[in-house]
Image (cartoon, rainbow, N blue to C red):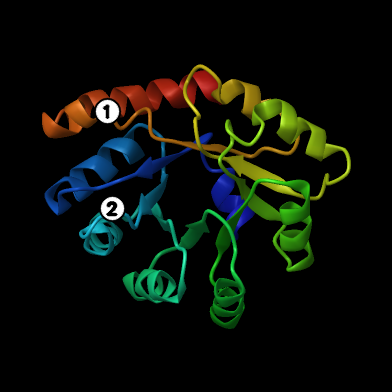
Amino acid sequence: MKIIEIMTLSPVIPVMVIDDVADAIPLAKALVEGGLKVLEITLRTGVAIESIKAIKAAVPKAIVGSGTVVNFDTFKASLAAGVDFMVSPGMSTELLKASVSESIEMLPGSATASEAMNLLDAGFHCQKFFPAEAAGGAAYLKSLAGPLPQITFCPTGGISMANARNYLMLSNVACVGGSWMLDKQLIRDKNWQEITRLSREICNQLK
């Protein structure tokens, strides 16, 4: 599945930081049941790769990506885990070479017009706008739509239910990335039903 197709499956891509691999499958199932089928598991914890493998095996309806792919080691680990796509806060020469050689779907990050243009030159028509709020928010992203209409963005960083719609109404935005439906207390309490309810509410309000 191409990255543009992945980005249009649901309005929000949950950005998941999994601390306990035992939570991986029930959390993924809760999100998917609520309509959030595209999941980004960040490689910020020691169980991230194991969690990706578990979700891929047990939740076939989930489209699973790895996040915070910042070097060749995290790229290789993601590839071995069988991810459907990878997300990076930026793009290095090393990652660019690796992504081209493996033909994996990538969503690289840009925060300025120059970065976005360089990624476009490298063939990336879909990009992560990061860190969205700190880099200028919806107003800045809207200003890029005029000179760079061929780029479709997934803004991530500081996104919440309060401002998600500001981004989603833009012509150059397909979805947003966020974690507000992943309340840590709900996860500690194993309250998967509430996470499903929140996910369904997000889909209904933002579609």
Q: Residue at x 16, y 45 (%)?
A: 23
Quarter holding residue 96: bottom right
Indicate the amino acid at tag 1.
Asp
Give the foreground label among 2 and 1.
Answer: 1
Q: What x and y, as percent, mark residue 196?
A: 29, 29
Residue topped by disc 2: 59
In the rendered view, would you say 103 is above or below 130? below
Left or right of residue 41: residue 178: right
Residue on which the image places disc 1: 183
> Which element is circle 1 on?
loop
Residue at (33%, 44%) from the top-left corner?
16
Q: Which of 58 and 11 lies nearest the eye of the viewer?
A: 11
- Tell me which label, 2 or 1, sits earlier in the chain: 2
128 sits left or right of 51 in the view: right
120 sits left or right of 103 in the view: right
Q: Are marks 2 and 1 in contact (CB under 8 Å)?
A: no
Q: What residue occupies the far front of the structure in this picture?
A: 134
The answer to whether residue 34 is visible is yes
Report helix, strand or loop for mark 2. Answer: loop
As measured in the structure, the alpha-carbon distance from the residue carrying label 2 to the one carrying label 1 is 21 Å
